[in-house]
């Protein structure tokens, strides 16, 4: 005798696609951050943290070089121009707020020169490092 068991409904395509896209974007972000970190290491930076999470969001890379402490935002898009456009005022405010929290948690870094860099990552191109991309003045 067979029981009539309710079948689990198959996911509807529109609900599944955004999840796949989010996963793809997450993987692209991790890959871009890895490429950016390798670029910084090749330039003589020491990576202090990657994907440092705060209530304001995360800092992609925190690095030190000589007397500088650098907070790096990594943007990956289809082109370097699209990646540059993705660094909005809101993004800058979020990174600055997160950097202030970093300094509160790492008081030894307060004496360092603070800098905000951006690394733009596009397919088929070397990452583009923009030092001092913005400052903390609001």
Image (tube, rainbow, N blue to C red):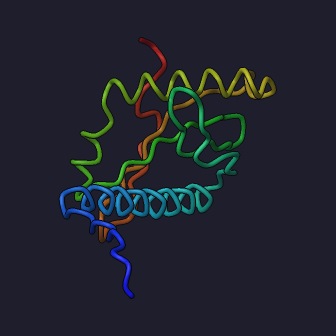
| Residue 50 drawn at (x, y percent) | 61, 49
| Image quarter of the C terminus | top left
Residue plotted at (62% across, 41% down): 52
Residue at 46% from the left image edge and 23% from the top image edge? 135
Label total for image: 0
In the picture as drawn, the residue positioned furthest to the right comes out as 108
Q: Residue furthest top?
A: 138
Q: Where is residue 26 in the image (x, y as percent from the top left)?
A: 42, 57
Q: In which quarter of the image is the N terminus?
A: bottom left
Residue lying farthest to the left in this orientation: 14
Which quadrant of the structure image shows residue 5?
Answer: bottom left
Q: Which residue is drawn at 79% across and 23% down?
A: 107
As drawn, which residue projects farthest toward the bottom? 1
Q: Nearer the viewer, residue 87 or 1?
A: 1
Q: Is residue 101 above or below residue 60?
A: above
Q: Where is residue 64 in the image (x, y as percent from the top left)?
A: 68, 42
Quadrant assignment, res 61: top right
Which residue: 71% across, 41% down? 66
Q: Give the x, y percent position of residue 119.
A: 42, 48
Quick check: 3 left or right of 70? left
Residue nearest the observer in this picture, 90 or 114: 90
Query: In the rendered image of this protein, does residue 23 appear above or below residue 46?
Result: below
Q: Quadrant of residue 65?
A: top right
């Amino acid at each position: 005798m067979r029981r009539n068991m309710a079948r689990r409904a198959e996911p509807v395509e529109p609900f599944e696609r955004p999840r796949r896209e989010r996963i793809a974007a997450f993987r692209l972000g991790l890959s871009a951050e890895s490429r950016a970190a390798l670029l910084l290491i090749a330039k003589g930076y020491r990576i202090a943290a990657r994907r440092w999470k705060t209530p304001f969001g995360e800092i992609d890379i925190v690095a030190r070089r000589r007397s500088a402490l650098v907070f790096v935002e990594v943007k990956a898009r289809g082109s370097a121009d699209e990646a540059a456009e993705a660094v909005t005022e809101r993004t800058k405010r979020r990174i600055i707020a997160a950097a202030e929290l970093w300094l509160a948690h790492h008081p030894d870094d307060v004496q360092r020169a603070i800098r905000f860099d951006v690394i733009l990552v596009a397919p088929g191109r070397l990452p583009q490092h923009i030092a001092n991309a913005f400052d903390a003045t609001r």
